[in-house]
Image (cartoon, rainbow, N blue to C red):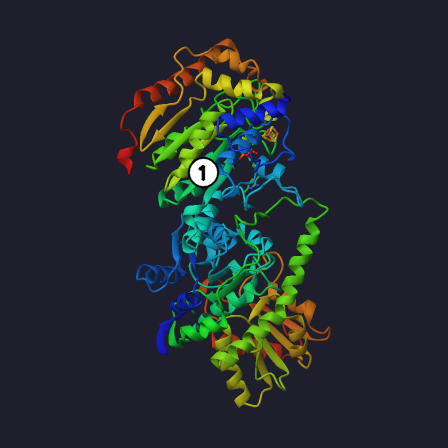
Amino acid sequence: MKKIEESSIAVAIGAKLARVQVCPMYPITPSTHIQEQIAEFINNGELEAELINVESEHSALSACIGAAAAGSRAFTATSSQGFALMFEVLPITSGLRLPIVMAVANRSLSAPINIWNDHSDAVSARDQGWIQLYVESGQEALDATIQAFKIAEDKKVQLPVMVNLDGFSLTHVFEEIDIPEEKQVDSFLPAYKPEHFLDIKNPKTFGPIAFPDSFMEFKKMQQEAMLESLEIIKKTNSDFAKKFGRSYGNGLIELYRMNDAKFAVIAMGTACGTARVVVDELRAKGKKVGLIKLRCLRPMPVKDLQNATKNLKALAVIDRHVSLGFEGPLFSDLKSIAKENLKIIDFIAGLGGRDVSMKHIHRVFEEIQKAKPKGSWLL
Amino acid sequence: MTEEKKLQNSEKIAGLNSEELFSSGHRACAGCGEALTLRHIMKAAGRNAIVVAATGCMEVVSTPFPQTAWGVPFIHVAFENIAAVASGIDSALKMQKKRQEINLLAIGGDGSSFDIGFGSLSGALERGHKFTYVCTDTEVYSNTGAQRSGATPFLANTTTSPAGKKIHGKIEPKKPLPLIVASHGIKYVATVSIANFFDLQNKMHKALAIDGPSFVIAYCPCPIGWQHDNSQTINLARLAVQTRVFPLYEIENGVLTFSQKIDEPKPLKDYFQLQGRFKHLSEEEIVQAQAYVNARYEFLLGIEGKKSFDVLY
Ligand SMILES: Cc1ncc(C[n+]2csc(CCOP(=O)(O)OP(=O)(O)O)c2C)c(N)n1
Ligand code: SF4
Ligand SMILES: [Mg+2]
């Protein structure tokens, strides 16, 4: 069924179609519409789930852990300061190998306090063992929420997944959305049946203390699961395409007009939409330019990126976060991935809701076609 | 009869569960009041229980990977969120229609309960989840080396409220947590002590039977933090009751009843002199500490048997 919906609502519909069972929620702009919609679904009897109106985001994720460890499908949503307050619980969730899904309406971190979009919340947690997907449209937000559970619960993965969508510039945007049929989603994502849970018939201890003789083995297993999830994310994307007729690149990255491209931009989230238009304009003038949309930041699709960049002369990285005292984190990642002679240039953009405009992207393409391109802050 | 046989028989007489669901072999110090408390709490909780434990001594000593002392499903997540984790479990069990058959316990130390996890505790109480919160009160952050907590009593010497030349220990009195918890209007609040095993069993059974949140706080001498001889743990727990330092009571449906009235309290000195944490006190300071103990006991006497907290729900 097609409907004009706000992206936040699309996420909530995705969670409902995924038949989430426990939803601990705490409001923060710009993720509130997701939380409010889940509450409405539950209180109207449209979603059979327990809503827990927790007293903090730290408790929201903690309650998700309790619910998932007890064997139920758990979902929450947050943003910015709420995300930062949860930080302690992020690596615990992944360390406990619980397939929790969280939508993050990406927003800057205070101070100065600012409610608008950038990626500094989620990107600063990229090392905490969560799979991080970044979406570009309301449709993708809905689809990725369903896919996220499928990925998270895969026996080879057993890891939490974050579905990142740009605060306001996506969360509050309306577009036509194709809402999948319940039955189809049920056959794509069957009920959650965990192998290990808090079971009185088979008591197990979760969250023990690991001494130096075993801690590294735990982390190594997590790393292996993260790397294995690359294939599962791809497969989930192609299985999804078979069932619903929609896909997002190969699930990890999407290449836009990259076939013979010599100059490209790599970005995450809504900036990709803007970049597509600029690429079209430049292509119309005969320029060999393209876009790499990075959909999955962690695990990092290294091979796919190497392939995508091997014929390029220069690559511009749009970082919507800066590792203060160093550089854009995506830029750092790309430098270690791409071939040695590729020119990679960093552009810090769109912090605290500053527009990443078509003008900016044009400037970026102009710059990287120069003999000696220089990175900058797109102010 | 061997000592073990005698113990087994006495447990049977009292109707005690002889199963050890918090089993020996854990790594707690000799004479640890918390470990004793957990052993007895788990006898009341039985096999159909799920335990959420906070970071602290008990979680550390009982789950050295790959070993575990727990005979029931157990989860440790962090220091300040056991009530939130329990909330999630409660909701999941409800969704799975398994809620009635399971005793859900959240067990945290005083640091976890009085301080860092206080917001999480308060939130879960306010939301009315069905679980029993057990605070094992060592009056100090035992696990990290006996630092002061909100539960540390007036003038106690701890590693962060040292008995210095200028300031003689903790200058604030203990936070009255059970009364604050009762103010949430929950149906059952109780104080227990390992020196009173059967009282502890009975109260735990009552707490677990509540269809909503219940709260039990257990007095747990810690030989390391309190600097007492580990043979004195039970004796100190008993003296704490007899001196009115830790009165045993229940607040059921908002009404307080004493489990054991102490009409002729022992002098505080009897209790203080067995513990290194009070040895720096002057006579005058002991009198000041006594004043706090008296005032709090009188407050409890004042509300005893009256409808006090029930108006709050
Ligand atoms: C967020 C956080 N802050 C601090 C710590 C360090 N820490 C671990 S246990 C503990 C004290 C525990 O005290 P209490 O709750 O009284 O339990 P006890 O060890 O006395 O049984 C502290 C401070 C931590 N693990 N997490
Ligand atoms: S330090 Fe205290 S509370 Fe911790 S195990 Fe030892 S005696 Fe028990
Ligand atoms: Mg303690």
Image: B199 above or below A241: above
Q: Evaluate whether residue B175 shows in this view.
A: no
Out of A74 and B132, give the one closest to the viewer: B132
Q: Is residue B24 left or right of residue B51?
A: right
Q: Is residue B184 left or right of residue B108?
A: left
Q: Residue B168: percent from the left, percent from the top?
A: 53, 19
Quadrant of the rendered image containing residue B206: top left
Residue type, numbered disc 1 = Tyr
Q: Residue B177: percent from the left, percent from the top?
A: 42, 31
Q: Residue B133: percent from the left, percent from the top?
A: 45, 38
Image: B267 above or below A318: above
Ligand 2 placement by image quarter = top right
Quadrant of the rendered image containing residue B22: top right
Image: A127 above or below A208: below
The residue that appears at 61% across and 25% down in the rendered structure is B5
| Residue annotated with mark 1 | B133
Disc 1 is placed on an element classified as strand
